[in-house]
Amino acid sequence: MTDDMSSKMNRSIKRPLTFARVRGISSVMFFLLLLTMIISLVLGTAEVSFKQIINIFSGTIPMDDPARLVILKIRLPRIILAGLVGFSLSMGGVVFQAILRNPLADPFILGVSSGSAFGAVLGIFLGFSFNLGVPVLSFGGGLLTICLVMYLGSKKMGVESSTILLTGVIINAFFTSIIMFFISTTADDRLHTMLFWLYGDLSQSRYGQLAIIAPVVFIASIFLYSFARDMNLITAGEETALQLGVDVERAKKVCLLIVSLVMGLVVSFSGLIGFVGLIVPHLGRMSFGSDHRLLIPVASLGGAIFLIIADTLARTVVSPSELPVGVITAFMGAPFFIYLLKTKGSQWSRS
Amino acid sequence: MIAFVMVLGWATHSRGTTFKDALGREVTLNGEPSRIVSLAPSITEILYFLGLGERVVGVTQFSYYPPEAALKPKVGSYIELNVEKIISLFPDLVIGTVDGNKPGVVDLLNQAGIQVFIVNPRNVKQAIETVGIIGQVCGVSKKAGLLTSRLNRRVTRILEEIRTKERPLVFLQINLRPIMTVNKNTIHHDLIRLAGGRNMTQDEPITYPRISMEAVIRERPEVIIISSMERGGRFEKARQEWLKWRSIPAVKNNRVHLIDSDLIDRPSPRIIDGLEAMARIIHPGLIMD
């Protein structure tokens, strides 16, 4: 170990990470998440009071009451989707930043986003429905990109970080150009639909979709959490990790694959929402340090909270009109992130 | 005798007539134009409406009404015009609109010696007037006059019928996802107004605002009209989507309708068909022949 590295580790080992601490902080985050969800339920174009919401959930309101329909059929599924997507994006960001040892990585850096986007845009162009055709094509596009990137990126030296990053960049560029082609040649209402999807659109959330996304995200998060210790070691240095008994290649491949699959699924329902996967992991690091056993739950829950807030703003700020949620995440994320960088520095420990 | 011939010769040279277009530009034509390029589908429709179909030598991409127009050479799309193609067709008149057609294109064509006449119909009344203006420029004023007075009569008949009726609150949906509608600066709004309705989103600051489902539920429109480019398919699904929200009066009273977007998007003669269709939707039981 170098002096630099050991001093950095000493700095962060002021309070040893116990399971109790992880559980405690995660519970606080979870409580904040519930609070955010409740507040978001109250806010929106149609005025629904907090009292009405209590009545709705206690079942004392008739089935076709408009407030009940607004809360249970529009807002609640939308908030849940925002939570799941934010959770996945942020978790993906944490994992990618660890595995690729790159603070600028976000879950889209390997091209999954553009492949999914290509699939979705193609689906919209062909007039497929948003309940089946578009998500299927979008997920297919994401899957295609994952396979391409894995195949091309691991040819020579295993999952070597810079090769795989470059492959992702090229694939991003390629699919983006195809998407631009579609956009420039579509002149009718499909164009608006495409653009709206490309900036992130959580407005068409259905319980059927949530029933598919939620279990996948839940299982994936358990899987990825089991690699938390390995991620700590990989971030400290791949050779060191190897020496300490981590099967680096396997860990990288499995984690990248799981995250990419989850991303492909999530994006196919929500469109492209940037910034969350890049910023929230760093916010988590700045607040709670880089130990992934704490960082993963904190950042994931933080991502859920972040996106729910962003989506609530997106649908209330210019009410009755709506902004694309990707615009809000950029507006929210960038200035706050710059402020934190100036006051705290990136806390990115490198060896 | 020689003087007479000379005077006749001089008169023939200055036979060019000058017209002023919607931008205040002076456009001079020597005789009736016989090779006309249309830069918008609505203009193509007007030319065919006036019986000038044979004189049309170039159209833009979506000029598929009437069907014969689709067979004419394409000069690009409404947004991206191919100037070289236009010039290569040797037109003696190009007719364009203010929206869409880039100003640079007009200059380029003028430099190539081609006369460009711009029209700018912003509501139904001006759409009918444009038929007359184009008719005049192309030398068929008499026929244009007959056709426009017929169109005007159809509008007046509707206005008389709806004059004493109450105006229901109308929500016009022009896009499926995201939900988009129109404010008062659109020809669609004019149609709703003339057809005896009240546009739910007339005071929105953006011309084609995206609107949330919650907003429609809150405003409780009495009629929902979905503008579609196709029969059935996705837009029928859109109508089915609305049927879930029974708290909206339009849904409860089964007043969610589809309308052909071609009839209400374009400031062409068919917009009167669109007006009649809309009036029948907003005030069922209207007597029109």
Image (cartoon, coloured by chain):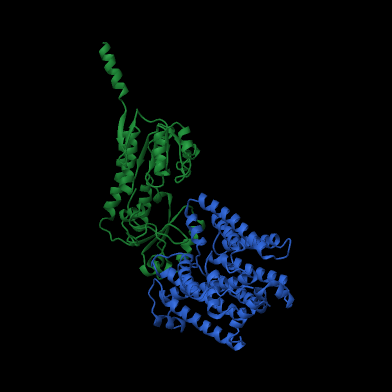
Chain colours: A blue, B green
Q: Nearer the viewer, residue B203 or B263?
A: B203
Task: Identify the image quadrant of residue A115.
Answer: bottom right
Position in image of residue A313 (x %, y %):
43, 71
Q: Is residue B261 above or below residue B201?
A: above
| Quadrant assignment for the N terminus of chain B | top left
Q: Is residue A224 left or right of residue B57?
A: right
Q: Is residue A223 left or right of residue B286?
A: right
Q: Residue lying farthest top?
A: B1
Q: Residue lying farthest bottom?
A: A20
Position in image of residue B116 (x %, y %):
38, 37
Task: Identify the image quadrant of residue B256.
Answer: bottom left
Q: Residue at x 48, y 66 (%)?
A: A330
Task: Identify the image quadrant of residue B142.
Answer: top left
Q: Nearer the viewer, residue A166 or A300?
A: A166
Q: Is residue B191 above or below residue A261?
A: above
Question: Can residue A74 be seen?
Answer: no
Q: Is residue A149 above or below residue A210?
A: above
Position in image of residue B228 (x %, y %):
45, 54
Question: Can residue A24 be seen?
Answer: yes
Q: Residue lying farthest front?
A: A3
Q: Is residue B237 left or right of residue A163?
A: left
Position in image of residue A176 (x %, y %):
57, 56
